[in-house]
Image (cartoon, rainbow, N blue to C red):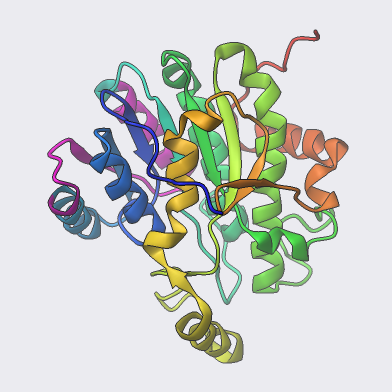
Amino acid sequence: MTKDADEGSMKGKTVVITGGNSGIGKETAIGLASRGARVIITSRDPSRGGAALAEICERSGSAEVEVVALDLASLANVRACTDELHRRCSQIDVLVNNAGLILGERAESEEGIEMTLAVNHFGPMALTLRLIDLLAASEGGRIVNVSSDAHRMARAFDFDDLHSRQRYRSMKAYSQSKLANILFTRELAPRVDGLGITVNALHPGFVRSGFARDGDLGGFFGLVFAVSTRIAAISAEAGARTSIYLASSPEVASTTGEYFARCRSRRPNGAARDSAAGRRLWELSEELIGESLAPAKAP
């Protein structure tokens, strides 16, 4: 039986959710605001952010909902967002790294990073590291990274063609980014354990949401994705259950470094459990984003 994601009062807690203006991010925001949390969503588009803010308040019955601008494709914008969050918050109890994308054609961020990895891995890592102090100020800070079972398509992380310059395939880039989410989670967990922070990753399921609907995918693959979504996908509300569970349930208050699906711990593939690859990606990422965190102390 699936565990009840409704467990856990969030009264007095501050939650930040990236990409909270649509899909499972918005449903996660509604669920946590309904439980009493002060919720801050991020949105790249101000108009969408404002519309989502009104809907979250109405559906949750909470007035403690805010929106902050964030474009994960820009490391400068990530820094501006975290500066704003430091102005607004004395602590953050939960950070949900939810925002993500998949692109039909290759693109690069303003820093020259392949766009899928920029938005799905490097941007969230920079955001997380810059908010560690606010999470450490909480009594039991939690980081929730939305990954995907798409990581199982990657047999190993491709360091040789990190930016997909030799050949670009949308699903390969996406699966690599979702693999990076789990490698990041497993590498981060011991580094923040001494700060009282837990970090876990999750697969939300195949969700019927706004994901990949803005012209990001075209051609035959885009058509297959659209048809499959209509036929087989679950609702965004159902897809948000594991995020809500990891953010609020007392059952996982001390669980860290794990991968979840349907509110239960699952074993990711071998590539996601490759500690050497995790360390290599961490070091490469620190250098690329210009942010760092002290390694875990030896026991």
Image quarter for residue 117?
Answer: bottom right
Residue at point 57%, 76% (across, down): 104
Residue 37, percent across and down? 27, 33
76 is within the stretch colored magenta: yes
Task: Please report the residue visible at 53 percent of the width from the left and 55 percent of the height from the top.
Answer: 109
Q: Quadrant of the N terminus?
A: bottom right
State left or right for residue 162 relative to residue 64.
right
Tell whether 212 sits left or right of 195. left
Depth check, front residue: 278 or 114:
278
**Residue lying at 44% horizontally and 52% vertically, measured from the top left:** 241
Q: Does 42 appear above or below 27?
A: above
Quarter holding the C terminus is: top right
Judging depth in this view, the residue of 155 and 116 nearest the camera is: 155
Give left or right: position of 42 versus 3: left
Q: Tell me residue 203's x, y (percent).
A: 59, 55
Q: Position of residue 182 (x, y in %)?
A: 68, 45
Q: Is residue 261 visible?
A: yes
Residue 231 in picture, x, y percent from top left: 49, 85
Q: Is residue 73 visible?
A: no
> Which stretch appears magenta?
58-86
| Quarter of the rendering containing residue 64 | top left
